[in-house]
Image: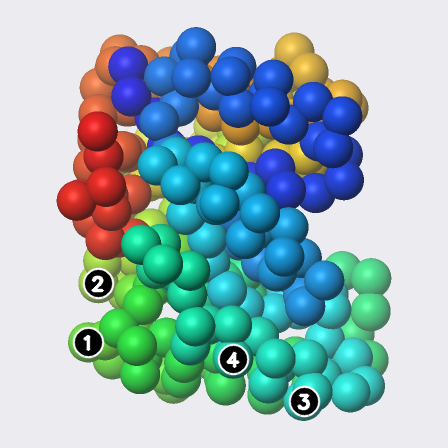
Amino acid sequence: MHLIDTHTHLYQPAFDGDREEAMNRCQKVGVDFILLPNIDVDSVPRIQNMIARWPNRCRGMMGLHPCHVKEGWEKELKKIEEVLNAPMPQSPWVAVGEIGLDLHWDTSTLDLQLEVLRIQLDWAKQRALPVVIHVRSAFKQLFEVLDSEMDDTLKGVVHCFTGDTQEANHVLSYPGWMLGIGGVSTYKKGGLDLVLPHVPLDRIILETDSPYLAPVPFRGKRNESSYVAIVAERVAEIAGVTADEVAKVTTENALRLFGLDGLKG
């Protein structure tokens, strides 16, 4: 079984004590690649260090997370765009991300978040890169933006999808867009057991969002990329297919969306 964790923050301090071991655990369960979404200026060197250490197993994204959009965002965004324009040798950025809208804790920055989101969507269009979207308590506002910005060049994924069937269908109305499915699919009241039966397997990619949102039986503990295998098993259970089939199709989906076809091996 070959898997890609399409969204993991394995570069964060939570793994400073055992990052090497965590990468080894990935290999043991068939997680061939991991994709590292940026969140702010401070996370850039951590991502770069991981890519330098595991150049054949890691790829990065570049963007400003909505929870880090605040006063002075222009300066931070300029620095992130400079990094986006200067990828590491032999390791191009595979997406603009993670970007999006988050109104769960604070709605006062909505206008700033909307402006920053539109700027970063434009980055993706200019560079023919997919976007990795974070959305929390803001599907209505997100869809208003995406509906107005959508064209043939804009592709992406709504990562850590936790919406309902109507919201899933809205995302899937965008050609080539994916739903990122992670540990929430294993939660008894997560709701994805009601959504995933209506989602074609070729529109799903797998992720962990580690160190957050660990799947059952590790819920409440630190998540890690090797647990994407648990997510594959759960999606297979819901879809009524084998885990091998889920791994095969979702890996192909990730290779296609992120332009990774020439990297596997």
> Would you call the spot at circle 2 few (<14 residues within 10 Å), some (14-19), or many (20 or more)?
some
Q: Nearer the viewer, residue 150 or 10?
A: 10
The three-letter amino acid code for the residue at tag 2 is Pro
Residue under numbered circle 4: 82
Residue under numbered circle 3: 74
Give the label on residue 152, or none.
1
Residue under numbered circle 2: 175
**Front label number (2 vs 1):** 1
Sequence order check: which comes first, mark 3 or mark 4?
3
Q: Quadrant of residue 205?
A: top left
Q: Position of residue 58 (x, y in %)?
A: 43, 41
Q: Is residue 145 visible?
A: yes
The three-letter amino acid code for the residue at tag 3 is Glu
> Would you call the spot at circle 4 few (<14 residues within 10 Å), some (14-19), or many (20 or more)?
few
The three-letter amino acid code for the residue at tag 4 is Glu
> Would you call the spot at circle 1 few (<14 residues within 10 Å), some (14-19), or many (20 or more)?
few
Q: Position of residue 30 (x, y in %)?
A: 36, 17
**Front label number (4 vs 2):** 4
